[in-house]
Image: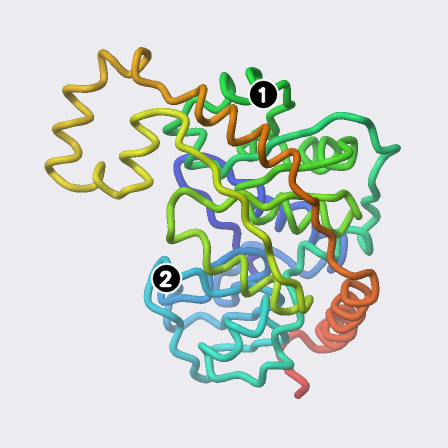
Amino acid sequence: MKLYCWRGVTRNFGDELNLLLWPRLLPGLFDDDESTLFLGIGSVLDARHPPGAIKLVAGAGYGGYQAPATLDGTWRIHWVRGPHTARLLGLPVSRGAGDSAMLLPAAGWRAEATGDGIAFMPHFESLLHGAWHEAAAQAGMVLIDPRGDPGGIIAAIGRCRLLLTEAMHGAIVADALRVPWVALRPLAAVHRAKWQDWAGALDLTISFRAVAASSLSEWLFASRLAMSGWGQGLLCHAQPALDRCRFTDAAANALMRAASATPQLSDDSALDRCQARMQEHLHALRRDPYHVTT
């Protein structure tokens, strides 16, 4: 059974968590046999997978990046990320037990002694196009790069007293470690809906704070203008002047305003409930990965 981990032009924290979490929770289960794909953490329940392969699902969700999966006999769904994914795929809402990254404490990860620092984690695409290192430094915050080593990122989240995050799995991991967090509304609208899927499993209402683009390039990308011919031309002409056109002051000010917002944490009992339900599914999966209990 092949452990699926999406990777684009760079590593992304949420997807890379698969390589840390599952070998600890399910030792000995994985190999390189792609006739069965294990879909754990990530917005990957869509049409990207080979139709002939068995798709075994443990906590993944739908993100809107491709057409949704059409469920047939090749799908073995133990649980999905949240109620929105469950409804979309025609599953019982109860099957939306939670994002598997919430199982990190069950695999041995804990928060360190909480420090007094404030950290900021942008979405990895924002770092590719923006000037967030400069904006975070201007705001007096530690920047956590979601493209880095996932174990180091977990440790960095566990050390801070507050995490501002545009990356959904920054919030999920902080919440699981009981580190208060503030959600920053992703600049690219396509990345927003999946947050509600995760939050729905916890009966949590997310209070998003606005964040400003940190550069012209990032603003164009988030607006999808960079994907059109007009946008590509504008980027080409603007590139020499990007250093003069960065919006770092606005971005840094938005971070400082977000840091003064009331932080969030899911209710302890809600987190315990989700983790217990996922553990039940996990026990069944260990007994027989290919048999799904209702």
- Establish if 82 lies above or below 9: below
Estimate the spatial distance between the alpha carbons at disc 2 and disc 1, rounded to whole Å: 40 Å
Residue 258, quarter of the rendered image: top right
Residue 91 image position (x, y, % from top left): 53, 83
Residue 291 image position (x, y, % from top left): 64, 82
Depth check, front residue: 278 or 255: 255
- Establish if 276 lies above or below 213: below
Quick check: 178 left or right of 65?
right
Q: Amino acid at mark 2?
A: Arg
SS class, disc 2: loop
Residue 217 can be seen in this image:
yes
For residue 48, the mark is 2
Residue 120 image position (x, y, % from top left): 61, 31
Residue bearing the label numbered 1: 139
Circle 2 or circle 1, nearest the eye: 1
Look at 58% across and 56% down and name the residue there. Answer: 41
Residue 276, quarter of the rendered image: bottom right
- Establish if 217 lies above or below 111: above
Depth check, front residue: 6 or 141: 141
Q: Amino acid at mark 1?
A: Ala
Dot 1 alpha-carbon crowd within 10 angstroms: few under 14, some 14 to 19, many 20 or more: many
For residue 221, the mark is none
SS class, disc 1: helix
Residue 32 image position (x, y, % from top left): 54, 54
